[in-house]
């Protein structure tokens, strides 16, 4: 009898631990933004004069669809502009070399992401290429400064 | 005048007693840590304790979690709707639960239910001289009686906290999506983009482990230090709940400041 009671307790404890671990798993997979599949592809670079708040891990989107992820944001020590390294998924291997990159903000207060606008060339980007056309992130202070200056100039 | 001096004398005596208990608690913890490897070999004891401490707390954790989540959903909706941001209800409910309410409320409930039970059990063993009898047989009572309960508490807390958070999130989604009409897709997708695996969930797990350690340590220590009378047991049980709650809330602030700064 003691044996049966003991096994009963063991089974219940096993169920309890399974419930707990299951809850942890559900939290990790369903609730968090954990992407089980990471982007695996080729890397391209782009130079910007201002990257705003773009960080590594930010998505790279083309026509709104995520095609890659920002891997690295560094500063060129000679020219002093920012170099953003992006990893593009191998499925999108026919991106023209005259594609332009911009930095947009998703929503009003969202995170910043890199947006690619496809060009029309017949040659495609390869691993290690640099994008020729870029436009930097919008810096609020510059816009306000421009506005104040143009208002001051207009008043004169 | 002499009444004032009497009050000061009593305060000083209480303070010294409190410091003494704190110091003995450290020694107790050290002894406990040293016998833990030996205690791990008695897995049947540990399993029995996990049943008592963990599984039997599951019902209160599930129900409380579900209701806390529902209240979060309701209150959150009432506030967010004024800003037209009711689609972010999922973010509000999930982050509140995973970062703070899950670990903290679970620890408080755990202290009240399992912690006080542990204190009462060990206190009664001390009062009926069972601990002394075990020691007479050259068996370390801390290794045989206290350590399995401590291990069970530390194992159960993170699991219970995860169950609480999950029950809360489903409670929040029940109120928000099913009852109040928030869009289900936005509820879950905004939650998924706002809740980070390492920043939020992992930090919540760390918190629940730390709280489990603290609550269980206080519970078994108060039981071990009970003055062996019935009034003593009642006092020890009260002290467990009060001290665990204060310690958990205080450490929650410290951990939050460290993690989410």
Image (cartoon, coloured by chain):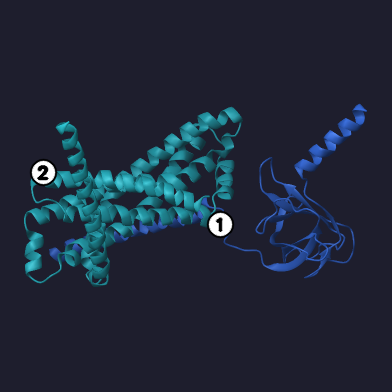
Chain colours: A blue, B cyan
Q: Is residue A120 left or right of residue B8?
A: right
For the residues marked 2 and 1, what is the alpha-carbon distance in whole angstroms? 52 Å
Q: Nearer the viewer, mark 2 or mark 1?
A: 2
User: What residue do we see at 37% from left, 46% from top?
Assistant: B250
Q: Position of residue B175 (x, y in %)?
A: 46, 35
Chain bearing mark 2: B
Crowding at label 2, few (<14), some or many (≥20) Cα neighbours within 10 Å? few
**In terms of depth relative to the viewer, which is nearer, A141 or B166?**
A141
Q: Secondary structure at mark 1?
A: loop
Q: Please say if B71 is above or below B199.
A: above
Q: A53 and B76: which one is in front? A: A53
Residue A3, placed above or below residue B200: below
Disc 1 residue crowd, few under 14, some 14–19, many 20+, Cα 10 Å: some
Q: Residue B80 vs residue A127: left or right? A: left
In the rendered image, residue A88, in percent from the top left (x then y), is placed at: 73, 63
Q: Residue at x 88, y 66 (%)?
A: A123
Q: Position of residue B208 (x, y in %)?
A: 38, 53
Res. B142 mark = none
Q: Residue at x 26, y 53 (%)?
A: B218
Task: Give the x, y percent position of residue A127.
Answer: 77, 70
Residue B54 can be seen in this image: no
Q: Is residue B34 visible?
A: yes
Q: Please state which of residues B251 and A1 is positioned toward the viewer in this rendering.
A: B251
Label 1 lies in what chain? Answer: A
**Outermost residue toward the front in this view:** B1
Left or right position of B195 against B143: right
| Label of residue B231 in the image | 2
Residue nearer the viewer, A34 or B142: B142
Q: Is residue A32 left or right of residue B101?
A: right
Quarter holding residue B225: bottom left
Q: Which residue is mark 1?
A: A34
């Amino acid at each position: 009898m003691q044996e049966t009671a003991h096994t009963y307790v063991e089974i219940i404890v096993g169920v309890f631990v399974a419930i707990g671990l299951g809850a942890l798993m559900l939290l990790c997979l369903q609730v968090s933004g954990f992407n089980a599949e990471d982007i695996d592809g080729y890397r391209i670079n782009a130079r910007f004069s201002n990257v705003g708040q773009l960080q590594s891990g930010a998505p790279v989107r083309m026509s709104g669809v995520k095609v890659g992820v920002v891997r690295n944001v560094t500063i060129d020590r000679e020219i002093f502009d920012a170099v953003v390294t992006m990893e593009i998924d191998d499925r999108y291997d026919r991106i023209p070399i005259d594609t332009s990159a911009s930095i947009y903000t998703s929503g009003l207060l969202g995170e910043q992401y890199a947006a690619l606008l496809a060009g029309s060339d017949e040659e495609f980007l390869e691993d290690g290429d640099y994008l020729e056309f870029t436009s930097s992130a919008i810096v609020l202070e510059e816009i306000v400064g421009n506005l104040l200056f143009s208002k001051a100039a207009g008043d004169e | 005048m002499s009444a004032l001096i009497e009050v000061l004398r009593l305060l000083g005596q209480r303070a010294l007693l409190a410091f003494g208990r704190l110091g003995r608690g450290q020694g107790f913890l050290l002894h406990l840590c040293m016998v833990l490897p030996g205690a791990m070999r008695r897995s049947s004891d540990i399993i029995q304790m996990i049943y008592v401490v963990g599984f039997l707390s599951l019902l209160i954790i599930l129900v409380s979690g579900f209701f806390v989540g529902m209240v979060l959903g309701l209150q959150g909706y009432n506030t967010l709707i004024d800003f037209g941001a009711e689609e972010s209800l999922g973010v509000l409910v999930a982050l509140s639960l995973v970062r703070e309410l899950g670990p903290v409320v679970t620890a408080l409930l755990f202290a009240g239910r399992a912690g006080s039970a542990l204190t009462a059990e060990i206190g009664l063993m001390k009062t009926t001289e069972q601990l002394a009898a075990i020691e007479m047989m050259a068996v370390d009572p801390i290794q045989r009686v206290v350590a399995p309960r401590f291990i069970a508490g530390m194992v159960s807390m993170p699991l219970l906290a995860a169950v609480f958070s999950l029950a809360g999130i489903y409670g929040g989604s029940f109120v928000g999506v099913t009852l109040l009409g928030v869009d289900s897709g936005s509820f879950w997708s905004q939650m998924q983009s706002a809740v980070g695996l390492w920043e939020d969930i992992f930090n919540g797990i760390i918190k629940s482990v730390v709280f489990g350690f603290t609550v269980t340590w206080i519970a078994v220590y108060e039981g071990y230090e009970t003055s062996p009378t019935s009034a003593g047991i009642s006092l020890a049980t009260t002290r467990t709940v009060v001290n665990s709650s204060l310690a958990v809330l205080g450490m929650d602030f410290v951990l939050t400041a460290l993690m989410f700064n």
